Amino acid sequence: MKLDGILPFARVLLEKVVSAGDIAIDCTVGNGKDTVFLANLVGKTGKIYGFDIQELAIMKTTEKLIENDLIKQVSLHLTGHENIKMVLPNEHHNKVRGAIFNLGYLPGGDKEIVTVPETTIKAVQDLLEIMAPEGIIVIVIYHGHPEGEVESDALSYYVKSIPQEKAHVLEYRFINQTNNPPFIIAIEKR
């Protein structure tokens, strides 16, 4: 297949805006794959802020970062992504180049603990305030479970209301696949 899959496309979008020395955010660190990816993009001179509400996610991500000698440029926070604006130092506001969310539940974790639309929408709103112009927010939406469907609907409704003067909003999905595959909403701040 020549088309990018969902997760590879998410990384392509981030590679377009995040480079050495930049600031980026992993809004749902999960098992640490995106955190490691972003930390490699920003290199030793950049900074990654990672958020998750589960201690297990923070632990797994910390282990991955140590294994890859990337822990120094990452600051992990055991709190929800709705607190991004409070956690980021003021000097990093308007300098964030990229952010990623993987919504739903922690793979291999408790499936009862899920992301919810209220906190995700607040995080996106705050990111749009503190991102650099042309910064990109990538949201990978897993809507194959009841809570995911609710969050997907609320988030889709919200992003359609973002004025085009404020941001470009893209939806990337495969429309002929079974089992509700994940899809991407990408938001580029203008």
Image (tube, rainbow, N blue to C red):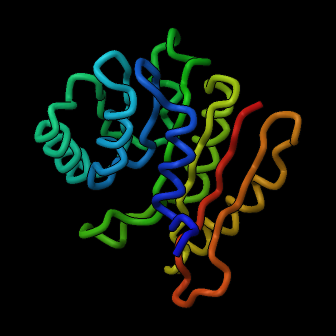
**Residue at the (73%, 54%) spot, across then down:** 170
Quarter of the image where the C terminus is located = top right
111 left or right of 136?
left
What residue occupies the far front of the structure in this picture?
Answer: 2
Residue 103 place in picture, x, y as percent: 48, 60
Up-down: is 175 above or below 160? below
Q: Tell whether 66 sits left or right of 136.
A: left
- In this rendered view, identify the residue nearer to me: 150 or 31: 31
In the depicted structure, whether residue 147 falls above or below residue 178: above
Q: Position of residue 58 (x, y in %)?
A: 24, 45
Judging depth in this view, the residue of 21 and 169 nearest the camera is 21
Picture coordinates of residue 180, whole percent (x, y): 55, 82
- Of 64 and 142, the residue lying toward us: 64
Image-quadrant location for residue 45:
top left
Q: Is residue 183 left or right of residue 111?
A: right
Q: Residue pushed farthest top?
A: 91
What count of labels does the image hold? 0
Residue 22 lies left or right of residue 67; in this view the side is right
2 is higher (above) or lower (below) than 48: below
The residue under the point 60% across, 58% down is 117
Tell me, yes or no, if residue 147 can be seen here: no
**Res. 98 visible in picture:** yes
Find the residue positioned furthest to the bottom: 178
Q: Residue drawn 35% across and 47% down?
A: 29
Residue 55: % across, % down: 22, 48
> Which residue is drawn at the image coordinates 66% and 63% (left, top)?
172
